[in-house]
Amino acid sequence: MQLARPELLSAGVLRGMAIMLSALGLALMLISLQPYVSVSMVSENGVSQGSPINQYGFLAAGLVFAVAMMSLASRKALASLLTPGFLLLGLLLAYNVATSPGSDQALRAVILTVIGMFIAFSVIVLPRGERDFQIALMLGLLAALAMSYGGLVVFPDLATHGYDAYEPQHAGLWRGHFSHKNIAGPVMCVVAICGLYLMRSGQGMIGFVIFVAGALFVVQTGSKTTSGLFPVAILIVMSATIFGRAAAAILLTLMALATAYLFTIGSLYHPRISYLVLDFLGDQTYTGRTTLWEFSLSRIMDHPWFGFGLYNFWGTGNVLGLDKPFEAAWDYRYIIHGHNNYLDILLNLGFVGGGLLIWVLFIGPMFNYARARRNPGNRKLADMFFMIIVFMSLLSFLETFFLARNDPIWLMHVFAVFGLHLLARFDISAGTAGQPPRRPSKAYG
């Protein structure tokens, strides 16, 4: 199906505009408007309020992409967003803004988050078919790789971690144009996954270069977690091709998630598992994360149904006003987030809002993947998006990035969510093959 309207301007102009806008959107998500700005993951001043350059720049970009989508994108593709999951998510965000003690701050954060989601959706919906999407994908990925690798040559002091009193162990590790190696690693993992898709889809040489460049950067960030989860995500999703059924990949994903839970949160309750983690990783605390998880678990039941409110736990009086925990590995009063997506979702949104968000971000995409793979023309692209989802699902046991404004990890996650959402409903390969659009299949969102 062509996801762009064919009646505006000439076909060549429309195609070029759609490709360039899609590539620019992807580059914006991966690079941001203020690269090479380093921050510590631990700060005496709590959570950063964000950069005005990024804030106003993303507002302007949001307007551009909103106009582009209204002018160029298929009405059916836009209307497909009107699913119960996405509509309830919109109501949830509105509710949290209305009930937030700092409503102005919450509104600004939600607006930036929604704009980032618009841009992620635009990257997929604007190209007129899979071939055009591949061109936009290559341009955006190469721009991000050039920015990071170029920084290692031109700005080596900015593209690598220097000495940080809070994190001296990171000195010398690569971070490229990203603010921290814990962001660079996961994002470059997604870049490598996209390179693998391009290799499988006939773009062998350029796909190989992107895959190798992304994978090498992941290794140089020194992130053992990302380096380990990266091949796991690939192997899990490739099982769908090996066995010829999406159910194989989904079943392995659920098994991997259960295992990840057992060896992270489960290690808090089972000493034997904790010692196994120590034997394998040399650190049974996951660099102090277990302290944060124990604290998070102790606070979830304080507000079980709707949580403390979006963006209203870490970095606020709910934590900053506590006495210093001298016995803890980390002083969690000044932590940016709890280093666990699932626990932080429950802290912020409770079981009601958290359950909805977990459905939209993790469970719904599994159903969409199964339906997208029924169409042979969508399978390779669906595999790419699901690899990202699997990787993010596993990473979520160690990092937090849900609804995180213009954070590139969050944007890559929602990029994959939207990708599977569209592939479950439309035959994107027909945009270049000239086939009539297929009837949308039943899908979840």
Image: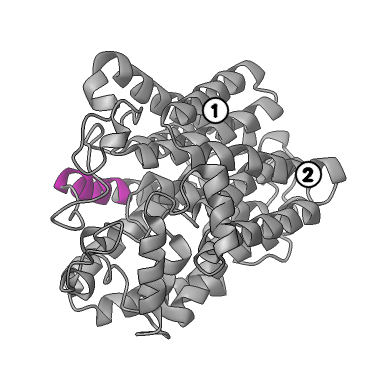
Name the kind of residue labelled 1 in the image. Answer: Ile
What's the CA distance linking mark 2 and mark 1? Answer: 27 Å
In the displayed structure, 409 sits above or below 31; it is below
Q: Percent position (x, y) of residue 363?
A: 61, 65
Residue name at image x 37 percent, y 70 percent: 296
Q: Which residue is mark 2?
A: 239
Whether residue 128 is visible to the viewer of this picture, yes or no, is no
Q: Quadrant of residue 22?
A: top left
Q: Residues within 10 Å of mark 2 (few under 14, many from 20)?
A: some
Residue name at image x 57 percent, y 67 percent: 270
Residue name at image x 29 percent, y 67 percent: 311
Name the kind of residue labelled 2 in the image. Answer: Ser
Label placed on residue 81: none
Report the number of numbered marks: 2
In the displayed structure, 115 sits above or below 124; it is below
Return the residue found at the far right.
243
Residue 201 horizontal side relative to residue 61, left or right? right
Q: Which residue is mark 1?
A: 135
The magenta region covers 52-62
Q: Quadrant of residue 252?
A: bottom right
Asked which secondary structure carries label 1, the reply is helix
- Front position among marks 2 and 1: 2
Q: Percent position (x, y) of residue 416?
A: 55, 49
